[in-house]
Image (cartoon, rainbow, N blue to C red):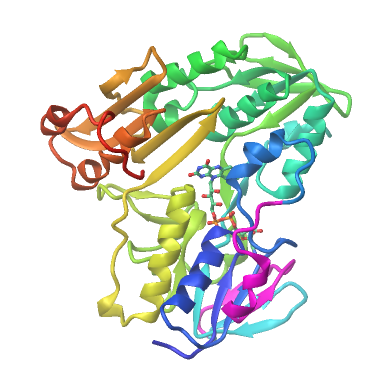
Amino acid sequence: MTDERIVIVGGGLSGLRTAERLRRLGHTGPVTLVSGEAHPPYDRPPLSKSLLTEDEPAGPKPLRDPGRYPELGLDLRLSRHAVALDTGRRELTLDGGETLPFGRLVIATGARARTITAFTRHANVHTLRTWEDCLRLRAALGSASHVTVIGGGVLGCEITASARARGVEVDLLEGLDQPLARVLGGAVGASVAALHRSRGVTVRCSAGVTAVRGDGRADTVVLADGTAIPTDLVVLAVGSVPNTEWLEGSGLALDDGVLCDRTGATSAEGVFAAGDVARMPHPDGRGTIRLEHWTGAGDTAALVAANLLAAPRDRRPLTEVPYFWSDQYGSRIQCLGVPGAGAEPVTAEGSLESGRFLVLYAEDGRVTGAAAMDMPAALARCRTAVGDRRPLSAVLDEAPWERRAPARA
Ligand SMILES: Cc1cc2nc3c(=O)[nH]c(=O)nc-3n(C[C@H](O)[C@H](O)[C@H](O)COP(=O)(O)OP(=O)(O)OC[C@H]3O[C@@H](n4cnc5c(N)ncnc54)[C@H](O)[C@@H]3O)c2cc1C
């Protein structure tokens, strides 16, 4: 246990959950939370779903009841950016030049939307990461007849579904052979593409965008094969960039994120990283991975809070199975583990053609991941199989799970 000041940089899910967990674990010392945003921590998943389709959303969905902040005893600094870190002097510098001494530090600065400068110079090319982005995009969808969504990952697919819910025509462009192929493989991706097509979306796969044309406002998206798509609005959903620029010169090991071990500890003693910005050793021991999942942000926050208060020998590694969900057209897609682009699944229940399925991914005969569409109970039954890498044949023998009592994913 430490009474020194703990500074958390980043006021998203992982920053807030770290602060909450520190208090729950009995830390009574000072905690400062520095956030670049003007709003107290809010939830991002609704930004691409309900908040994009609602007529007049009141505001971002807070992650904590405003009335319950006093009990956290937080020194909350909103609209402030950390600009430099000195791990030797244990000092954080904020914009404006103020320095904050700290005993322990948590980096929870998340990520921002990746942009393509040649495209974003047009006023009507949008990205989506913040509440302000959501407001702008929602307003633009209100007056658009057609939107081109560049990027068929989870975010691009959700924005597509929300645009359709608002009656807007959509061209969904994906560079790989299917939407979601990078995370769930081509077979599941084809099922997701079919879902979008059934809702009237023009899904174009293996589509390379070469230009976004227009005079100040984009009006045409041009593909490598020469196809020109007339459009009112463009959304770029081409991934994210971790917010680590402020750490350059700090001496911390960085590589598309803050490198840390599976306890969340970075290369500097007393400095930890959580959430989307953290790059950890891959659960299968091969290389490193930076996950950008809501559940992972909470898991790593809880982990880091506990490890930060523990003696180094008592720190525990992250053991939670990676999990994400995505809501599209009222269907829920869920995934456990990290299947990856090359993984092709075995169907355990339902069928990919029907759009209701549970699939398992395996390597060397052992289960490494599971994905489902509209089969939450069945997916939940696979958590241990994925976590323990159980033999695929044994797990398949236990199916079907869907008809049994539901369990939480
Ligand atoms: C639109 C959208 C929809 C999503 N939907 C899903 C979903 O359905 N399912 C799912 O599993 N996941 C979803 N996610 C992912 C999930 O929301 C993220 O994994 C999670 O928000 C990560 O939290 P974080 O706190 O690590 O980072 P962030 O939420 O990015 O928060 C980081 C905070 O740090 C601040 N910051 C950055 N730099 C500095 C600095 N130098 N100084 C001070 N503050 C700084 C930022 O302004 C931000 O407030 C979605 C994400 C988005 C954007």
* Residue depicted at 34% across the width and 40% down the height: 336
Extreme-front residue of the structure: 405
Quarter of the image where one finds residue 404: top left
Left or right position of 260 against 152 = left
* Residue depicted at 68% across the width and 36% down the height: 116
Of the 4 image quadrants, the one containing the C terminus is top left
Of the 4 image quadrants, the one containing the N terminus is bottom left
Residue closer to the observer: 27 or 271: 27
Q: Is residue 321 visible?
A: yes
Residue 77 lies in the magenta-colored region: yes
Image position, residue 82 (x, y; %): 66, 70
* Residue depicted at 57% across the width and 77% down the height: 72
Residue closer to the observer: 174 or 295: 295
Residue closer to the observer: 175 or 373: 373
Image position, residue 256 (x, y; %): 49, 51
Image position, residue 166 (x, y; %): 72, 24
Residue closer to the observer: 208 or 398: 398
Extreme-right residue of the structure: 215
Q: How many marks?
A: 0
Quarter of the image where one finds residue 314: bottom left
Magenta residue span = 60-88
Q: Is residue 121 visible?
A: no
Residue 180 lies in the magenta-colored region: no
Image position, residue 191 (x, y; %): 43, 17
* Residue depicted at 25% across the width and 39% down the height: 382
